[in-house]
Amino acid sequence: MKRNTWQREAVRGALDANDGFVSAQALHSALHSTGSPIGLATVYRALADLADTGEADSLQSPEGESLYRACSTNDHHHHLICRNCGLTVEIEADAVETWAKDVAAKNGFTAAAHVVDVFGLCAACTAKAAASAE
């Protein structure tokens, strides 16, 4: 178990302050804007540790950048993520769980794991886009 340092707590606090997924660079900038002397490499290490312990979710953006957010549950879950504003909703997807297990078993795989993140536009961003198109 990793010990809690002020750096790890600072990263955890900054992550908690965000509603959606955020990059290590953006989190580092936010910490520096509050006067924190924390280094970028330390932010990366803290985020990796938080993801390893289930305290943070991590995913790759469609552009390939690693993004992180505070995890509200340690249970396996999936996400709906707005491509525009970053709003993230944790969802259960029983049909996906069943499908993943079935596909793995049919192909002789055991101990299969998966990650499902669905990117789209949230209701607010869809409404804004519709209003600006008028």
Image (cartoon, rainbow, N blue to C red):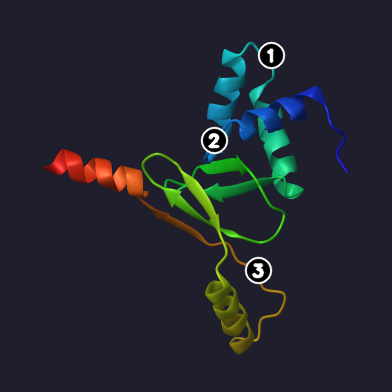
Q: Secondary structure at mark 2?
A: strand
The image quarter containing residue 50 is: top right
Expressed as whole percent of the image width and height from the top left, the position of residue 13 reads: 68, 29
**Marks 2/1: CA–CA distance:** 18 Å
- Please state which amino acid type lies under the numbered disc 2: Ser
* Relative to 75, 118 lies left or right: left
- 38 or 71: nearer the eye? 71
> What residue do we see at 64% from left, 10% from top?
35
Earlier along the polypeptide chain: callout 3 or callout 1?
A: 1
Quarter of the image containing the C terminus? top left
Q: Is residue 62 visible?
A: no
**Callout 3 amino acid:** Ala
Give the labeled residue for mark 2: 23
Left or right position of 30 against 5: left
At 26% from the left and 45% from the top, the residue drawn is 127
Q: Amino acid at mark 1?
A: Pro
- How many circles with numbers are drawn on the protein? 3
Quarter of the rendering containing residue 36 = top right
Going from N to C along the chain, the mark reached first, 2 or 1, is: 2
Which image quarter holds the N terminus? Answer: top right
- Name the residue located 55 percent from the left edge and 68 percent from the top edge: 93
**Tag 1 secondary structure:** loop
Q: Residue at x 41, y 54 (%)?
A: 119
Mark 1 Cα within 10 Å, few/some/many (few <14, many 20+)? Answer: few
Q: Which mark is residue 91?
A: none
In this view, the residue in front, 65 or 15, is: 15
Residue hosting label 1: 37
Residue annotated with mark 3: 113
Q: Residues within 10 Å of mark 3 (few under 14, many from 20)?
A: few
Residue 33 seen from this side? yes
